[in-house]
Amino acid sequence: MPTHLPSDVPSDVPSDVPSKVPSKVNEHSASSSAAVNQAPGFWAEPWFWLSLAAGLLVWVSLWWLGVPMTTSLNLSLLTFVLSVLVYPVLEEIVFRGWLQEWLLTFPVMQASKLGFTVANGVTSGIFAAFHLFSQSPLWAVSILFPSLVFGWLRDRYDSLLPGVLVHMFYNAGLLLLFG
């Protein structure tokens, strides 16, 4: 549960009732830790399910751009576990839990358009750039949109858990469809 309520939540709302209003980034508390918050009830919100469905858009876009689909599913268990379970957790901790959280301590990074903070944009750009070390430029650029979604989930729910779950889903689809 978020450790603070947005200022636009009436003061007569008990502090133990989670707010449906996204927490305001400019009221970000240094004591708040996105990594440990549980984001209760995020699975009941349509935005979470729409962010999962956006994975389909990413996969179709890659196919449309000509990224070859896999013709045989020749995955080792280790590759699957690393790509779908381990890497998403580690990447979300480093990029959204540490970098994005740190960037949000700067007022200029707290500005947002359509719910996407500057910190999310910077983090997503760096996240995509890091994928250039192991993937083609087209593939790395295609990671920018999902990264913005992961960062948006982190900002909306003040938790890494929704982004980790969506990241796992995206990676599973990418691995199964494109190898």
Image (cartoon, rainbow, N blue to C red):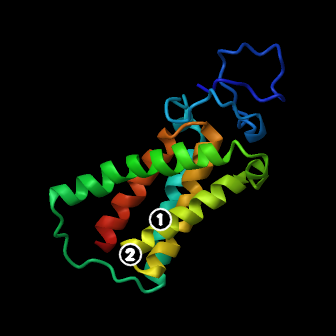
Q: Residue furthest bottom?
A: 66
Q: Which mark is on residue 103?
A: none
**Type of the residue with mark 2:** Gln
* Residue 103 position within the rendered picture, expressed as x and y whole percent measured from the top left: 65, 48
| Residue located at (61% from left, 29% from top) | 32
Q: Residues within 10 Å of mark 2 (few under 14, many from 20)?
A: few
Q: Is residue 23 left or right of residue 51?
A: right
Counting from the top left corner in percent of width and height, residue 130 is at 46, 66
Q: Tell me where residue 154 sits by quadrant.
A: top right
Q: In the rendered structure, which disc, 2 or 1, sits on the residue that comes first in sequence?
A: 1
Which residue corresponds to the image point at 61% horizontal and 38% vertical from the top-left? Answer: 157
Identify the residue position indicated by label 1 in the image: 56
Asked whether 72 or 171 is in front, the reply is: 171
Which of 30 and 2 lies nearest the eye of the viewer? 30
Q: Percent position (x, y) of residue 177?
A: 32, 70
Look at the image and tell me whether residue 47 can be seen. no
Q: Is residue 55 above or below residue 112?
A: below
Q: Which residue is mark 2?
A: 135
SS category of the residue bearing label 1: helix
Residue at left offset 34%, top offset 83%: 68
